[in-house]
Image: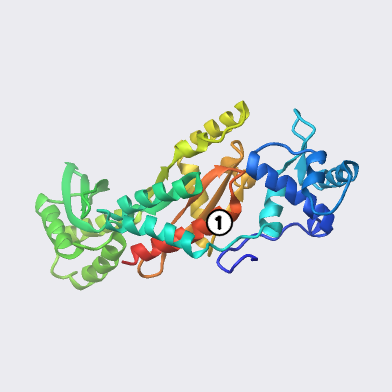
Amino acid sequence: MAHHDPIHLIAPRAGLAQLNERSRDIFRQIVESYLATGEPVGSRNISRLIAMPLSPASVRNVMADLEQLGLIYAPHTSAGRLPTELGLRFFVDALMQVGDLNDSERQAIQSQLTSVGHAQSVEAALEEALTRLSGLTRAAAVVLTPKSNARLKHIEFVRLEPEKALVILVGEDGQVENRVLTLPPGVPSSALTEAGNFLNARIRGRTLAEARLELETALGEARTELDQLTHKVISAGIASWSGGENEDRQLIVRGHANLLEDLHALEDLERVRLLFDDLETKRGVIDLLGRAETAEGVRIFIGSENKLFSLSGSSTIISPYRDAAGHIVGVLGVIGPTRLNYARVIPTVDYAARIVSRLLGG
């Protein structure tokens, strides 16, 4: 089956589209062999694997052409060939059949992820879903969640200095978040108390985004009843919530151990170590995943196509997920070696994102 709709991939470069059937067949064998074993494959093996009868010498000629095109290369240690990142990209975009999941596979993912729905909080549900996704794909699973989706329970202002206060936000799921707020000069403690009361009467059970909309309206209407300084404290409080959008993103990674399972050589180990370092720095991962939020469907980044993982040569397959209102609220997917089983992982991530959207939609 060809690519189905939700999966948008980037078109291959024009020159590659000219490959004849024989070259494609040989190239496909090299890639599939690499994805299965991680090992370079030589012309003798390929001449046995391909459908059309070709001598190892003819296969070598085709391999030389493929190398010229930048699709394969010879690692220094062997006579065999491996796909380059460009080659993998071309394979994923142009040659690979992205199978749709069959009913039993959908059922398996669904039952794995739906049992997650009983978790205490959205975050716990996502963590659990990731653990399952990581198990299904044998890679590390990642999710970028908006922290601001927690529903609020209580807010309090605590004065730190004459012109600084701590805003303490308590979520229904027990999460506590503190932000430091600059106060207008001369704010009395009574204004802090009044601001807290005004907000608490209106925020309970709402997310930060919902509370902000609600409060901006309420503030406009209550302008005359509120003391001017109280009004300023409330406005400053609301402004502090909308600041630092990026800081409110949370990255959860599960299944690191899967990346260690299938290592072939010391350089593999070194690559995984670099990948772990990349995942630890988080900032870059958040930016990378954030880029996928503007896109429909599954996005695939192979190796150095994302600056972040260029050293570890990893692939990232990610898809946005949505809330009950249909807004994209985060991204989930997997990160693993470039020899991921793309044909399986792509539809799995796609389907997992849809199920997570359904769970969040209640």
Quadrant of residue 60 in the image?
top right
Above or below residue 6? Residue 194 is above
Quadrant of residue 160 in the image?
top left
Q: List the residue tagged with mark 1.
A: 346
Coordinates of residue 271 in the picture (x, y in percent): 58, 33
Residue, x 50% and y 56% (percent of image)?
A: 349
Horizontally, is 131 left or right of 222 in the view?
Answer: right
Horizontally, is 106 left or right of 346 in the view?
Answer: left
Residue, x 17% and y 50% (percent of image)?
A: 157
Horizontally, is 260 left or right of 90 in the view?
Answer: left
Query: What secondary structure is found at the residue carrying circle 1?
Result: helix
Coordinates of residue 206 in the picture (x, y in percent): 24, 63
The answer to whether any part of residue 322 appears in the image is no
Residue, x 38% and y 59% (percent of image)?
A: 111
Query: Is residue 198 or residue 21 the one in the foreground?
Result: 21
The answer to whether any part of residue 291 appears in the image is yes
